[in-house]
Image: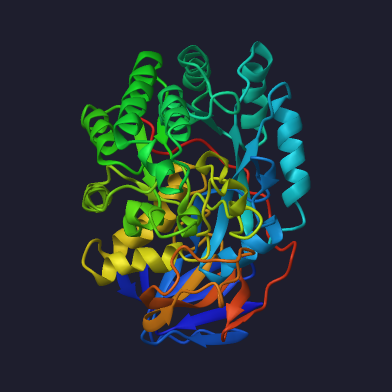
Amino acid sequence: MSTLIRNGLVINATGSHAADVLIQGEHIAALVTPGFSVEADEVVDAAGKYVIPGGIDAHTHMEMPFGGTQSADTFETGTTAAAWGGTTTIVDFAVQPKGSSLLSTLDKWHSKADGNCAVDYGFHMIISDVTDESLKEMDSCIAAGVNSFKMFMAYPGVFYATDGEILRAMQKARETGATIMMHAENGIAIDQLVAQALASGLGDPVQHGLTRPPELEGEATSRAIQLAKVTGSPLYIVHLSASQALDAVTAARDTGQNVFAETCPQYLYLSLEDLAKPGFEGAKYVASPPLRPKEHQSSLWRGLRTNDLSVVSTDHCPFCFKDQKQLGVGDFSKIPNGMPGVEHRVDLLHQGVVKGEITRERWVEIVSTTPARMFGMYPRKGVIAPGADADVVIYDPKATQTISAETHHMAVDYSAYEGFEVTGRVDTVFSRGRKVIADGAYHGSTGHGRFVSRDLNQYLV
């Protein structure tokens, strides 16, 4: 099957130009000068629209166990919602339980995802148990196409790693070229603040934000950077939310250190005020790190412009308000941490283009090209170019929409962006040459998505 996308404006991270895009089978075959005669089985008119590489969400949590429950989206529902939002590849996290092996964990996540995804997918590995055996298994994970390993400076007793354990894992990453991903919050200090708040009778959702102050994200980020400097390990800070943490990342990058960071749409558009909504409404916005005061948002947008923030992922980890978030009524520490977002990332970041915060090319770069390079999928993914997978999105920059739980496709009963009016909308989505979204309808199928075996970080120096 061949498809010709005519009359669109092709936007890559390196520039924009008018071109027709010829898809043959699962790949992009050619970029054609507009008006040049090309035969194809199907012709799609993209006049007035952008043609961009499919989005890559490098931070999702489908079917993730947390606090006695699990995230509401399965790999089937989550990847279907991703497709609706113009994301054609996700990278999810396989979560190692204490006492288990990395390889058995990887097998378990393959059993969840394989044959169940609507779009392509890869895995990061969460290391929660640093032992001689798990460090050896990092080599086997890399051979299996999983070469990024997440650790936590938060959640003592669950995921928390000591500085010594982090150092050992970073030394192994230095040997192999793997990337250590870090949830950087000072969990020991945070637990004390949480206990003090609860002892004082303060159990409302806003306390989640007040007991995880931005200074403790900044401190942990600085500490992780120093451990990476000592070991020579690459470091990727996940879901950066605070200007203090960004300052630390910027300083490290200015010295040439292999330090990278992502932020998420919730930190660009939502704030501590949402956590403080009346009653228990703020529970919808509980995630870690927490939403920050609004003044942090301008720093994050600036970081995206300067490339000190390299990627925008979602940290998609949805829990339904009813039955799941409500587990924490009266005790904010029991509210499952996470928000839905995989369906709306491309649209929300396009608002940065509309408002003049970023260029169209930078929009494509942070939602697709950089994550492809950061996690070893480029040029197979992340670019409109001959030979690349035909993960192609036709995007209407002038269409308007209102985000709502009534119309989204994620398996969760609320939207963190309820009522947001946005300019721009996904029109048509191709996943490896197959049309999965078109004419306001889903044309994909469960099992179309394939596992993506990834190479090493392409930004390492």
Drawn side of residue 87 relative to residue 225, left or right: right
Q: Which quadrant is home to the C terminus?
A: top left
Residue 116 point in image, percent of width and height = 75, 58
Q: Nearer the viewer, residue 365 or 162?
A: 162
Q: Which quadrant is home to the N terminus?
A: bottom right
Please indicate, yes or no, whether residue 15 appears anywhere in the rendered image: no
Q: How many discs mark residues in the rendered view?
A: 0
In the displayed structure, would residue 15 be above or below residue 405? above
Q: Nearer the viewer, residue 336 or 85?
A: 336
Please indicate, yes or no, whether residue 266 appears anywhere in the rendered image: yes
Residue 227 point in image, percent of width and height = 38, 17
Q: How is the rendered protein coloured?
A: rainbow
Q: Nearer the viewer, residue 31 or 307?
A: 307
Give the farthest residue toward the front: 201
In the displayed structure, would residue 126 be above or below residue 386? above
In the displayed structure, would residue 62 be above or below residue 254? below
Residue 459 point in image, percent of width and height = 38, 37
Q: Residue at x 75, y 48 (%)?
A: 112
Q: Residue at x 59, y 32 (%)?
A: 126
Q: Residue at x 36, y 63 (%)?
A: 349
Q: Residue at x 51, y 84 (%)?
A: 38
In the displayed structure, would residue 434 be above or below residue 139? below
Residue 174 point in image, percent of width and height = 46, 20
Drawn side of residue 249 relative to residue 109, left or right: left
Q: Nearer the viewer, residue 244 or 200?
A: 200
Drawn side of residue 250 relative to residue 125, left or right: left
Dividing the picture into quadrants, the one containing residue 48 is bottom left
